Image (spheres, grey):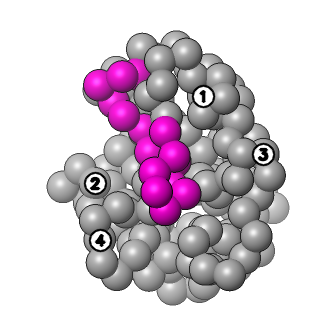
Amino acid sequence: MVLLTDNSLCRDCQACVLGCSLWHEGECNPSLSRVSVTKDMAKYKFEISVCKQCETPACVAVCPSEALVIDNQGIVILLEDNCTKCGNCMEACPYNAIFFNANQNRYIKCDMCVGRAEGPLCAILCPAGAITLEQDKQKENC
């Protein structure tokens, strides 16, 4: 499974961002979301940043503390207890999809809503189809 994004469809409704933070943290707070939308209001363009669950993840390769692991479904999971907060993963991610929450002093990243039977909430909530869950697509080779 991979999350595909189409920035041209995004309308910055923030449903993905708020749904993600609500599912993972129990509150609608963009700084707690594992997906972000960067805005260029002058051009009315948006860029969605979410983990692509790379086939060969650069973030996993550079993590010195094995805080990033690939589970049996191929999902890159962040083990917060192992994280030393070095920032290597965030710098290595070609999709800008690992975020540092300064208020909580921790890194966060998409885990495809592990444990949610219906799948990633961001894809379900996106009314424009800018984020979709695809099962047959080739994973990115990061």
Q: Locate residue 4, reporting x and y percent.
A: 67, 71
Amino acid, disc 3: Cys
Cα–Cα span, label 3 and label 1: 12 Å
Calculate the distance from the C-alpha at mark 4 to the C-alpha at mark 2. Answer: 10 Å
Q: Nearer the viewer, mark 2 or mark 1?
A: 1
Secondary element at image label 2: helix
The residue beneath circle 1 is 89
**What kind of residue is marked 4?**
Arg
| Residue at point 62%, 80% (across, down) | 134
**Mark in front: 4 vs 2:** 4
Looking at marks 1 and 4 on the same chain, the residue that comes earlier in the sequence is marked by 1
- Amino acid at the residue labelled 2: His
Q: Which residues are magenta?
A: 69-83
Would residue 11 be visible to someone looking at this image?
no
**Disc 4 vs disc 3: Cβ atoms closer than 8 Å?**
no
Which of marks 1 and 2 precedes in the sequence?
A: 2
Question: Are circles 3 and 2 on residues that touch, CB within 8 Å?
Answer: no
In the displayed structure, does residue 88 sit left or right of residue 114? right
139, above or below 92, in the image: below
Q: Residues within 10 Å of mark 2 (few under 14, many from 20)?
A: some
Q: Residue 65: image x %, image y %?
A: 47, 18
Q: Which residue is mark 3?
A: 142
- Residue 130: mark: none
In which image quadrant can residue 79 be found? Answer: top left
What is the x, y in percent for residue 103?
Answer: 31, 25
- Residue 128 in the image: x percent, y percent? 59, 85
